Image (cartoon, rainbow, N blue to C red):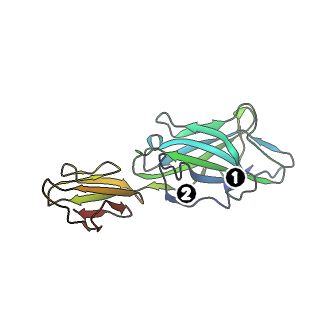
Amino acid sequence: LNVDLGPNNPASHLYMCSSDTNNPRNLMQQIHICNPCGTSRAINGLKLQAGGTGNDWTGIQSVVVRLDSDCNGIPEGGDLLTGSYTANDGPLTLCSTTSPIATVPGGQCICLLIYYQMKCNAPVGTYYFDVTEIRSTSCLQTCANGLPLRSATKSRIRFRLTVVNPGGGSVTSDAGGINCPTVCSADFDANSTVTLYAAPSSGASFAGWSGDGSGTGPLTVTMNSDKTVTA
């Protein structure tokens, strides 16, 4: 087998954590597998090696593999293989011992899509997968050129939100973290939104927000950089 990155392999991006209902799983890698031989070859599984500047096993929650037979980047059907990180171990073998997950006809190619799901408390950093082995019948390693095959990096970046509260009262955030005047700064995922609520002291009124926000009602801040808001 000859293995390389597929034509719709995703580029590097900021990942979304598992509690994000808009994107609970993220495409990590499209694997392009070609069979130069005259007879069909069965694929039963893959061996992956996670790595990066973050801690892979505390960051990566689960991995799934789906079929993309025409390599257009669109999965066909459901999950073929699933796996989870439960220990401090970068390698993860996903394999079906009962039947192949895909068959590559002689002289043809298919693609597999690897999706990953991150924990929301994952360390800040970049992550990637290496496909290190292709497994065939009985989950035995089969000969494959082009391995290890590394994905593009997926990054978790956080920005700091700071609240300045010179007039007294309190400021809290819907996402937790901010409870000023006790806790007046916190880090949030890049491109996430945080809503701040101001409660004036007894007998006082709230004059409004300034800095990286304005208005007099609840303030929604988009965390695309470090932000400072004065209440």
**Type of residue at label 1?**
Val
Query: Of the numbered discs in the image, which one, if any, rests on residue 93?
Result: none
Q: x, y (%) of residue 88?
A: 46, 36
Q: Please tell me which residue lies in front, 197 or 124.
A: 197
Relative to 212, 107 lies left or right: right
Q: Amino acid at mark 2?
A: Ala
Q: Which residue is mark 2?
A: 152
Which residue appears at 42% of the width and 60% of the height?
191
Q: Is residue 152 visible?
A: yes
Q: Identify the residue at the far left of this view.
A: 203
- The answer to whether residue 158 is visible is no
Residue 127 on image: x %, y %? 49, 51
**Closer to the camera, 205 or 190?**
205
Instruction: Specify few, some or many for label 2: CA neighbours under 10 Å numbering under 14, 14-19, or 20 or more.
Output: some
The residue wearing badge 1 is 3
Task: Give the secondary structure at mark 2.
Answer: loop
Residue 182: horizontal and vertical position, in percent?
19, 48
